């Protein structure tokens, strides 16, 4: 397969795989696509270790790193050294009480006294994402992606000075144009079917609009779970696909067992766009957690990054308990077709085989 993105990155297959798991990232790149490591959950020190491991296990193949540098969030004008402390004071007591009440209702115990402190902020801000960018650019990455809007222009310039291409996710043609204005090399047009932060426009409607709006390569994202969907995205003008939820249940994935089990059992109707995770709309597994935040008793969600700071410990407590009815996780609608555990390599080759079958079917239909 050959498109502008395969030429741009020297890869055999225009398949990009976003994952927080280094094993998945390396396996996709070794199979001929491009794995992209989500840096969000890692401290700079942890990210350094993850990337060093990928360097040693990717067999010289290209890979990328994905960061989150939102264009707008609470505390954007706070100094880095006072950021966490000042943000903590902005979380209302009523919201904290609501979370504690929800956990008590479902019998979720506190964390043990010897539990680690956890991470209350992550890379949701410019101040916390820039150190991740610095670490990433010390490694031989081929791509730096921004998951939430156009990256800062100086970050784009910095990546380019290291010979690294830049991608950014867009949920509307207007967002795509903003990204091109700051110099991104690839636009990931992500439909509402996608897991994690996502907009309201469906993939089939969005892709041709973005393709017509920009002159850089476009990747189709949102609802890409098999080769037929990949072929559809390419037919709409995309030059590759960006996949995420597809890798949550592969053999190499480090997805928590509770979440993996629910994903394997879920249908495409078992996800919902909710602000209950980060304060911005994100598609999550639908359950009593997401329902509670939409109920009449809910105080409403807080803006990014306050919402995640509010619920971070709660999510850890849920993960260490038996309260599966509260265990939510970013996941897209394609989880309805991911009902078995397969190796990453098999998934990649399955995408290519199904893509070829789809093209062959279309060719037969158009024959005289």
Image (tube, rainbow, N blue to C red):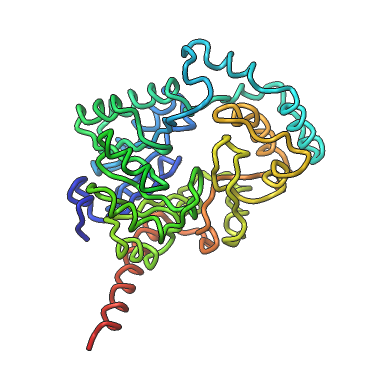
Determine which quarter of the picture holds residue 296: top right
List x then y, in percent, for residue 195. Answer: 50, 49
Is 338 or 193 nearer to us in this picture?
A: 193
Could you tell me which quadrant the C terminus lies in?
bottom left
Q: Please identify the residue farthest to the bottom as the structure is shown.
A: 368
Q: In this view, does 270 lie above or below 313?
A: below
Which of 40/256 is in front? Answer: 40
Q: Position of residue 287 (x, y in %)?
A: 68, 50
Which residue does the image show at 37% across and 42% down from the upper left? 175
The image shows residue 49 at horizontal and vertical percentages of: 39, 28
Can you give x and y, in whole percent of width and height, for residue 261 in the image? 61, 54
- On the rendered structure, is 254 left or right of 99? left
Image quarter of residue 366: bottom left
Q: Residue at x 29, y 57 (%)?
A: 238
Side of 297 relative to 206 (left or right): right
Q: Identify which residue is drawn at 19% across, 48% down.
A: 10
- The mark tally for this picture is 0
Q: Is residue 62 left or right of residue 194?
A: left
User: Is 229 or 251 nearer to us in this picture?
Assistant: 229
The quarter in which the N terminus is drawn is bottom left
């Amino acid at each position: 397969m050959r498109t502008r993105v395969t030429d741009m990155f020297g890869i055999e297959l225009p398949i990009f795989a976003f994952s927080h798991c280094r094993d998945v990232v390396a396996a996709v790149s070794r199979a001929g696509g491009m794995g992209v490591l989500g840096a969000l959950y890692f401290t700079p020190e942890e990210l350094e270790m993850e990337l060093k491991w990928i360097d040693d296990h990717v067999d010289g193949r290209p890979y990328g790193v994905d960061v989150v540098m939102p264009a707008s969030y609470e505390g954007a004008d706070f100094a880095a050294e006072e950021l966490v402390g000042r943000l903590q004071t902005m979380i209302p007591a009523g919201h904290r009480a609501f979370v504690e009440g929800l956990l008590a209702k479902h019998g979720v115990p506190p964390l043990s006294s010897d539990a680690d402190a956890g991470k209350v902020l992550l890379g949701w801000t410019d101040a916390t994402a820039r150190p991740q960018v610095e670490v990433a650019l010390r490694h031989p990455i081929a791509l730096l992606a921004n998951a939430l809007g156009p990256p800062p222009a100086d970050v784009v310039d910095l990546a380019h000075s290291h010979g690294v291409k830049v991608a950014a996710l867009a949920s509307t043609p207007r967002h795509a144009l903003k990204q091109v204005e700051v110099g991104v090399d690839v636009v990931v047009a992500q439909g509402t079917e996608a897991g994690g932060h996502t907009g309201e426009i469906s993939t089939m409607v969005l892709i041709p609009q973005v393709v017509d709006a920009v002159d850089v390569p476009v990747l189709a994202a949102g609802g890409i779970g098999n080769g037929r969907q990949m072929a559809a995205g390419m037919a709409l003008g995309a030059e590759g696909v960006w996949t995420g939820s597809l890798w949550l249940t592969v053999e190499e994935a480090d997805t928590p067992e509770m979440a993996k089990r629910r994903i394997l059992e879920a249908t495409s109707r078992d996800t919902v766009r909710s602000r209950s995770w980060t304060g911005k709309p994100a598609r999550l597994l639908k359950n009593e957690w997401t329902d509670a935040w939409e109920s009449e008793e809910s105080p409403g969600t807080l803006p990014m990054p306050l919402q995640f700071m509010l619920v971070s410990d709660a999510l850890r407590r849920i993960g260490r308990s038996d309260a599966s009815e509260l265990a939510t996780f970013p996941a897209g609608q394609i989880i309805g077709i991911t009902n078995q555990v397969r190796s990453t390599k098999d998934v990649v080759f399955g995408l290519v085989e199904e893509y070829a079958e789809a093209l062959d079917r279309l060719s037969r239909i158009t024959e005289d």
